[in-house]
Image (cartoon, rainbow, N blue to C red):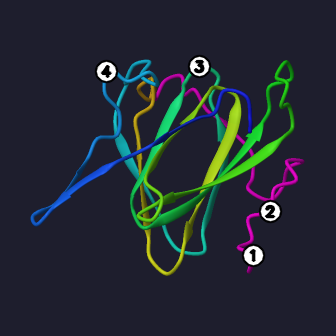
Amino acid sequence: MIEGIRVKQLTRHVDDRGYLMEILRDDDELFIKVGQVYVSTCYPGVVKAWHAHQRQTDNFCVVKGHAKIGLYDGREDSPTYRQTATFVLGDANPILLQIPPLVWHGQMALGNEMSYLLNLPTEHYDREHPDELRVDAFDNDFNYDWAVCSR
């Protein structure tokens, strides 16, 4: 597991009307602060990667469909420097995935439908000074495989 990654298993409260699922509360042990809330979609077969933040912590939850979340630890002072990790988030695995600063991340929709990723980052997007570092999904030294493997 990459140092600083935190996972919270989410519970769906289901009844005959549908369900309610709490994702993050201000009294949750994972709560730092929320700078904004947004949804990022991803089409099947598309990889949206890689980016990292210098200050921002992300809180990911896939609320519709499924997504493969790839992580790469780019922090030279981390005990898990250069390690990768994969998480599958979505309907069948409702979790909150907290990603600390300087851990590179990306997403890929799984299956034949678009994925809907809800993010509650700790910082709002600053158009004048974006807190974003970017590299190409396949042109990097991360040694991460985006392929879906049959098991």
Residue picked out by circle 2: 145
* Mark nearer the N terminus (3 vs 2): 3
Q: Amino acid at mark 1?
A: Cys
Q: Is residue 67 magenta?
A: no
Q: Residue at x 43, y 54 (%)?
A: 94
Q: Which residues are magenta?
A: 127-151
Alpha-carbon span between mark 1 and mark 3: 34 Å
Q: Marks 3 and 2: which is nearer the front?
A: 2
- Between residue 13 and residue 78, name the one nearer to us: 13
**Label 2: few (<14), some or many (≥20) within 10 Å?**
few
The label shown at residue 55 is 3
Contact (CB < 8 A) between labels 1 and 2?
A: yes
Q: Position of residue 5 (x, y in %)?
A: 63, 33
- Between residue 140 and residue 118, name the one nearer to us: 118
**Label 3: few (<14), some or many (≥20) within 10 Å?**
few
Q: Residue at x 51, y 33 (%)?
A: 58
Alpha-carbon span between mark 4 and mark 2: 35 Å
Image quarter of residue 1: top right
Secondary structure beneath label 3: loop
Contact (CB < 8 A) between labels 3 and 4?
A: no
Residue picked out by circle 1: 149
**Label 1: few (<14), some or many (≥20) within 10 Å?**
few
